[in-house]
Image (cartoon, rainbow, N blue to C red):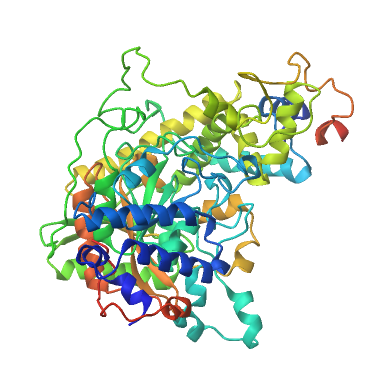
């Protein structure tokens, strides 16, 4: 049995029974992070504080007083969440060296339950992108690039050269978090999702990526991109774990006035989910141009699975789907133009040496601090917000947004419980191929299947489904009704059990083998 | 229609971000073109949507009580230039455009 088996086992149970201690677990994860450094998944590894947290957890467990199911569980957090005393960079020069003075609410909640924070993960600069390739710390590599499954399928040019050449992207923008979970360096990670940034890399890295309903989880401390669409995202290796994380994070936060005030009741998913009474909708517009035939076939197979289980499977229509990406483009750049205005060098972050005037200092700071993608979006956003353009673009986009949200409303109102769609158009492409197109083009292409859920604020989840012909993960997406995460995750769990997605065979993980754990099928810590 | 140089300069001033080069301007042109697709959609009688939560509840106001603060030290720590409890900014009443040697790409072209 290898570390990957150990990490796949019921770790919480193992911790409870003392078969492994939080310190051992933490040390092993830290070692694995070191040996998978080439993935570039982490920007900051908080080794000292993690070990300290693990020690505290151990003391509590010895006393028989764990704080909960997450006590001692190593987790990673995307580097656009504020973490007290720890550098938070958003993968940008603008925030290099910025030490957060506070914890984001979601981070605080995890720490309050004893989770062990291993570090901050890599992303596209300010979460703008769909590849995790545009941050100042360099691109994140998909762990599957180094898997046996991928290597077996790729045609080697020469033995040493091809690995460097052929590595594939993680997708983005939460690529670091997805890679961290996928390569076993942590049990769960936080991402963010504005247009698909949690689900897209989850699909490419073969992990579960949950985008909760807008308003369910606090955004306080999440450096904002689009305030009306951002949500913290959850990345785990199985659906049950996502449910556990959701339970610890959801709920009203007085510090985030966009969180709903309803009481959130954490739930456990049934062991044997039943989908026979459900109606599954297949939106025909999600058969988007460019959708690979492989994924189309998987999507169809999935629909059949539900049919055979007795669920009602119907084709539905979301007529404004194709405008979602255009609408997003306008609303996103507009909100970005506003949100990025705070970065002027005066109170935090990078500050230029130019000191002739306030404006020249601001302009120089922003020129030095932001990459082209960010600057491009700021300028576009400001264009759409100009007085002469406001109605034509910004308000127009807000109207189209309502139409998109209404599309979903109509479909859910007609008796459909869950929508089933692909998450991405294809499996992960090699980095060298990905960078041939610019960021905006790529984002427009890659977000097409995930973006509308953010438009309408609906919960959505990527479930790893199968390996492509190239040996890379492909996932499918489920979209649910607002605040109906329990139903959404139940369906996701059922599907997960049906497809039995294979475990990644990663040499590095196997090297840390010590055979403590027996082979177990579950990837869960719950 | 190409965006006029006046508008481009205006944008640079509003955003305090410069276009840097012709690629930057081209990027904006493409972004506008892309956004123009919105006009294919009929939105007669449709209200703009500010928030997906509009039906569920309204943004509430809380009591005007001071519940946190006294964090001057932490807040000043991240600033590069401070004097006592002040953030220090360069002189503020100098418009960007009038400065010598501070030309942006647009002004230079």
Name the residue: 31% across, 13% down.
B63
Quadrant for the C terminus of chain A in the image: bottom left
In the rendered view, does B107 fall on the left or right side of B81? right
Name the residue: 45% across, 78% down.
A506
Say above or below: A281 vs A466: above
The quarter of the picture where residue A93 lies is top right
Name the residue: 77% across, 40% down.
B20
Say above or below: A305 vs A74: below
Residue A471 % position (x, y): 45, 78
The quarter of the picture where residue A510 lies is bottom left
Say above or below: B4 vs A413: above
Taking depth in this image into account, of A186 and B8 the one nearest to the observer is A186
Taking depth in this image into account, of A342 and B67 the one nearest to the observer is B67
In the rendered view, does A10 fall on the left or right side of A466? left
Quadrant for the N terminus of chain A in the image: bottom left
Residue A523 % position (x, y): 29, 69
Taking depth in this image into account, of B49 and A196 the one nearest to the observer is A196
The quarter of the picture where residue B49 lies is top left
Does the image show residue A417? no
Residue A26 % position (x, y): 39, 62
């Amino acid at each position: 049995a290898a570390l990957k088996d150990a990490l796949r086992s019921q770790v919480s149970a193992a911790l409870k029974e003392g078969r492994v201690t939080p310190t051992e677990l933490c040390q092993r994860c830290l070692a694995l992070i070191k040996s998978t450094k080439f993935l570039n998944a982490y920007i900051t590894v908080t080794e000292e504080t993690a070990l300290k947290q693990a020690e505290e957890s151990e003391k509590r467990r010895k006393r028989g007083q764990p704080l909960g199911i997450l006590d001692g569980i190593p987790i990673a957090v995307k580097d656009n969440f504020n973490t007290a005393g720890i550098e938070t960079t958003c993968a940008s020069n603008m925030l290099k060296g910025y030490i957060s003075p506070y914890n984001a609410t979601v981070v605080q909640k995890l720490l309050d339950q004893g989770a062990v924070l291993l570090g901050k993960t890599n992303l596209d600069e300010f979460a703008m992108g769909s590849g995790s390739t545009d941050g100042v710390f360099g691109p994140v590599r998909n762990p599957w690039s180094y898997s046996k499954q991928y290597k077996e399928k790729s045609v080697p040019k020469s033995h040493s050269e091809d690995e460097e050449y052929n590595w594939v992207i993680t997708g983005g923008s939460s690529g670091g978090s997805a890679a961290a979970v996928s390569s076993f360096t942590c049990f769960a990670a936080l991402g963010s999702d504005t247009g698909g940034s949690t689900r897209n890399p989850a699909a490419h890295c073969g992990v579960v990526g949950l985008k909760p309903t807008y308003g369910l989880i606090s955004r306080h401390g999440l450096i904002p991109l689009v305030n009306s669409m951002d949500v913290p995202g959850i990345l785990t290796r199985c659906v049950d774990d996502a449910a556990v994380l959701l339970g610890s994070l959801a709920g009203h936060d007085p510090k985030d006035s966009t969180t709903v005030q309803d009481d959130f009741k954490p739930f456990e998913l049934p062991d044997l989910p039943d989908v026979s009474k459900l109606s599954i909708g297949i939106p025909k517009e999600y058969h988007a141009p460019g959708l690979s035939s492989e994924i189309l076939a998987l999507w169809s197979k999935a629909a059949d699975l539900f049919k055979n289980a007795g669920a009602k499977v119907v084709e539905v229509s979301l007529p404004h789907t194709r405008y979602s990406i255009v609408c997003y483009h306008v609303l996103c750049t507009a909100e970005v133009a506003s949100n990025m205005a705070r970065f002027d060098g005066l109170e935090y972050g990078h500050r230029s040496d130019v000191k002739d005037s306030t404006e020249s200092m601001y302009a120089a700071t922003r020129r030095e601090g932001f990459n082209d993608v960010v600057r491009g979006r700021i300028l576009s956003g400001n264009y759409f917000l100009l007085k002469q353009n406001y109605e034509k673009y910004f308000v127009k986009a807000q109207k189209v947004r309502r139409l998109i949200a209404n599309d979903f409303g109509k479909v859910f109102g007609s008796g459909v419980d869950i929508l089933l769609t692909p998450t991405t158009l294809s499996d992960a492409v090699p980095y060298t191929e990905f960078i041939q197109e610019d960021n905006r083009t790529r984002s427009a292409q890659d977000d097409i299947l995930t973006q509308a859920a953010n438009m309408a604020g609906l919960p959505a989840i990527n479930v790893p489904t199968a390996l492509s012909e190239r040996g890379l993960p492909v996932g499918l997406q489920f979209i649910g009704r607002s605040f109906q995460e329990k139903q959404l995750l139940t369906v996701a769990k059922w599907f997960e059990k049906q497809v039995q997605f294979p475990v990644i065979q990663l040499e590095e993980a196997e090297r840390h083998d010590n055979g403590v754990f027996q082979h177990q099928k579950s990837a869960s810590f719950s | 229609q190409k965006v006029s140089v006046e508008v481009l300069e205006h944008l640079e001033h509003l955003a305090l971000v410069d276009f840097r080069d012709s690629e930057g301007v081209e990027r904006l042109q493409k972004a506008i073109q892309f956004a123009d697709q919105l006009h294919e959609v009929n939105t007669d009688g449709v209200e703009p949507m500010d928030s997906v939560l509009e039906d569920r509840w309204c943004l509430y106001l809380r009591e005007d009580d001071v519940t946190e603060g006294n964090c001057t030290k932490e807040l000043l720590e991240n600033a590069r230039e401070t004097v006592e409890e002040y953030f220090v900014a360069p002189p503020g009443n100098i418009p960007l455009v009038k400065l010598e040697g501070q030309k942006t790409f647009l002004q230079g072209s």
